[in-house]
Amino acid sequence: MFLTVLTAVLFSLFSTAVLGYISVATPIGPFIAPTLVLIASLFMPIIRVFSRSTGLNTQVMLAVAGGSVGGMLATAIGFSFPTLRFLDVILFDAWMAQPVFFIGAIFGLSLSAGLLGLLIADFAEHRMLVEQQLAFPVGELSYKMIVAQQQARKAYQLLTGLLSSFLFSVLQSGITFCKEWIPDCFTHRVIPESLTLMNELSIGVLTIPTIKFDLMPVYWAIGFITGIEIMAPLFLGAVLKFVVADTINHVWFADLSSMNFMLAFASGMVVAGALSGLVSTPQMLYKAMKKWWSTRGSGNWKHTIAPFLRLETVVVAVVVLGYLTYFHFTLMQQIYLVLFTTMCAYQIMEIAGKIGLAQLGRFATFVMVPALFLFNLNPVQITLIATFVEICCGVAVDVMFSRKMAQLGGISNKTMRWFQLLGLVVSSLAIGVVFWFLCKRFGLGSPEFFAQRAQSRALLVQSGMFNYWVLGLGFVTGYILKWLHINPMWVLGGLLMPLNITLGLSTGAVLTKFTKTPDEWHPFWSGIFAAGSLWMVIKAFV
């Protein structure tokens, strides 16, 4: 058991570090559990020496369940917490100047929201796993990977990806016995001195922008794993920026700087997406709550209400309300946040149980936007609301994936809960440290640490500050994209992200077309993005 606990702790630290970087550097947060399963497969021979072979699969499942919580927690933090930097840079820098306070604030937020997520998962477990028998695909996939007898080839693919990525990083960064062999970036070159599209329109000097190459393998890997679906909207976003938006800016809004125009245009797109979610989300929540309430008279009522009658409920309530009170949330604001977060978490779990996706950002926006109108919130409270919702809902989903794995593997709920709690505590302690060092080393908003999702959320909050005509153009663009069934957030990524990220993700997506079975190559590319992300975390600490 000691070895299993140690493995769970190491997996939790690994997941927190990798996803802590990936979720900020890109707008993607891949599930880490399958990667952890493959890493465990590499060490199976060693584990067998110290463990009973009959219980080996159970130990791997417990270690993966404890470790995967850290990945989901880090993803939620990376998606939402940087919003504070873009709402109030002076305040964020003041927090950064106090590392103990900064790390403590993230620890308290992670633990309080994560504990609520665990409690909600307890609340919904019997309903979703026993009564509805939802698949929770990531949990099923992890279970099948663990019990499969032929994982060696995939494990070696993962190892090859890990070693290849580390070798690339060493050759690119340089160490004591080796100079930098791979360039950090490609220098831009002027194409012509000027380019005139029309007699009255001179764009000026057209250049190929500097393309940073240091993280390109990581972007290829994430693009490959995510799939070809991301390429078209990302490419469309890049075209929208360099052809449409820049042209409109120069012709009709020449008084606005390129940055101000782009921020206003992107903000309009974000508002369109948020309104679309605000219209459909309440109906989804109503149906989910109505369906749940219809079971109140059934013989299984005791299973749904029992979790809220335990001591754990009191402990979670004290931790959550204590943390929110520290940041000056009123009692009404606390009730609002906890109530709507619980409703959203239940709905997200049900969606994830069917299709395997956790739609965190959409529901976080649904809780945050009404709060902006109902309460007088400061930038810290706005950020905490969005991050609290994403952490709570993300942890609840990840917990249910692992509970499905436990159900299939015949593992007791009590044992699984303890390992998930262990993973939550370890990752809550680690994420603040990891995030502070990453911010200190790379700086939020830089090409290496772009935080596109957090910037989008900040644009939504600040939308009233921009030019209304440009805001309207962005809103219409976002609405048209939704009408065409194109994901506006991916288009927004191509619009806002540095060109090297867009090119890298798109290239990785295109690579899937060069193989008949892309899934067979996922272990290799998982090793690439895991090692590349871990290398960036190491660079932040040294």
Image (spheres, grey):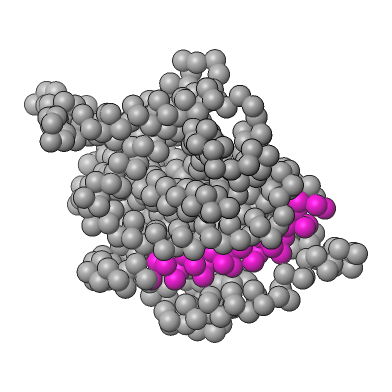
Q: Is residue 61 visible?
A: no
Residue for point 54% across, 42% down: 50
Instruction: Please indicate whether residue 245 sits to the left or right of residue 191 in the image.
Output: right
Instruction: Please indicate whether residue 389 sits to the left or right of residue 477 in the image.
Output: right
| 89 or 352: nearer the viewer | 352
**What secondary structure characterizes most of the magenta part?**
helix
Place of residue 25 in the rendered image (x, y in percent of width and height, measured from the top left) = 34, 45
Residue for point 36% across, 62% down: 432
Q: Tell me if residue 204 comes above or below residue 323 in the rendering.
A: above
Query: Which quadrant would residue 126 be assigned to in this image?
Result: bottom right
112 within the magenta span: yes
Place of residue 312 in the rendered image (x, y in percent of width and height, measured from the top left) = 64, 74
| 14 or 454: nearer the viewer | 14
Q: Tell me if residue 39 comes above or below residue 296 in the rendering.
A: above
Place of residue 197 in the rendered image (x, y in percent of width and height, measured from the top left) = 22, 27
Q: Tell me if residue 228 comes above or below residue 101 in the rendering.
A: above
147 within the magenta span: no
Magenta region, residue range? 105-131
Residue for point 37% across, 71% down: 104
| 253 or 115: nearer the viewer | 115
